[in-house]
Image (tube, helix red, strand yellow):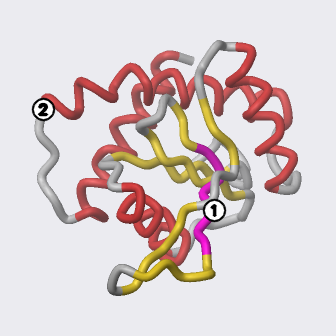
């Protein structure tokens, strides 16, 4: 399990370096490394218990239970206010989870991740000004993506 989490963490790190287009310092990587391992460990446990092919809401509820059982702090479905020229818009963004107060997490249960899914996470990260996010897909057949 630990090796799988480390591999996923490295792959996510590479992906988000590419997606975000910015250089991530070694210090920031080390700050969030443990949090990323713990989050992905919980995600793997949910996948091992539930398998693939269920609705996103089932994985969301299962991951919330797993995070709670592991003592990992999170906030679920917290609305994010959006602004235009200093004026608040009625439209809100709602990421699936904030984990450890520093990781934006977007969950999917689709057979293949699309660029729109990555764009959604990037928007959440930009709005929250958080440098790290995880796009976790439980719909992939062999392992979470």
In the image, which residues are magenta? 92-97
Q: Is residue 102 above or below residue 20?
A: above
Q: Quadrant of the N terminus?
A: top right
Q: What is the x, y in percent for residue 101?
A: 47, 34
Q: How many marks?
A: 2
Taking the spot 63% from the left edge, 38% from the top edge, the residue there is 75
Looking at the rendered structure, which numbered label has been put on residue 61? none
Mark 2: secondary structure: helix
Question: Residue 92 falls in which quadrant of the image?
Answer: bottom right
Looking at the rendered structure, which numbered label has been put on residue 26? 2
Q: Is residue 68 above or below residue 111?
A: above
Given residues 126 and 58, the one toward you in this image is 126
* 141 falls in the magenta region: no
Judge left or right: residue 77 versus residue 40. right
Given residues 85 and 113, the one toward you in this image is 85
Quick one: label 1, few (<14), some, or many (20+) residues within 10 Å?
Answer: some
Say which residue label 1 marks.
94
Tag in front: 2 or 1 = 1
Q: Is residue 89 above or below residue 67?
A: below
Taking the spot 35% from the left edge, 79% from the top edge, the residue there is 86
């Amino acid at each position: 399990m630990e090796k799988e989490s480390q591999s996923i963490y490295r792959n996510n790190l590479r992906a988000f370096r590419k997606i975000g287009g910015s250089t991530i310092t070694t210090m920031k990587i080390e700050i969030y490394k443990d949090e990323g391992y713990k989050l992905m460990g919980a995600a793997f446990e949910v996948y091992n218990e539930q398998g693939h092919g269920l609705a996103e809401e089932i994985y969301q509820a299962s991951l919330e239970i797993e995070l709670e059982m592991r003592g990992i702090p999170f906030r679920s479905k917290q609305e994010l206010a959006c602004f235009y020229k200093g004026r608040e818009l009625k439209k809100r963004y709602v990421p699936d989870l904030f984990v450890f107060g520093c990781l934006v997490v977007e969950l999917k249960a689709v057979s293949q991740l699309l660029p729109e899914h990555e764009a959604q996470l990037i928007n959440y990260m930009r709005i929250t000004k958080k440098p790290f996010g995880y796009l976790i897909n439980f719909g992939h057949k062999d392992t979470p993506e």
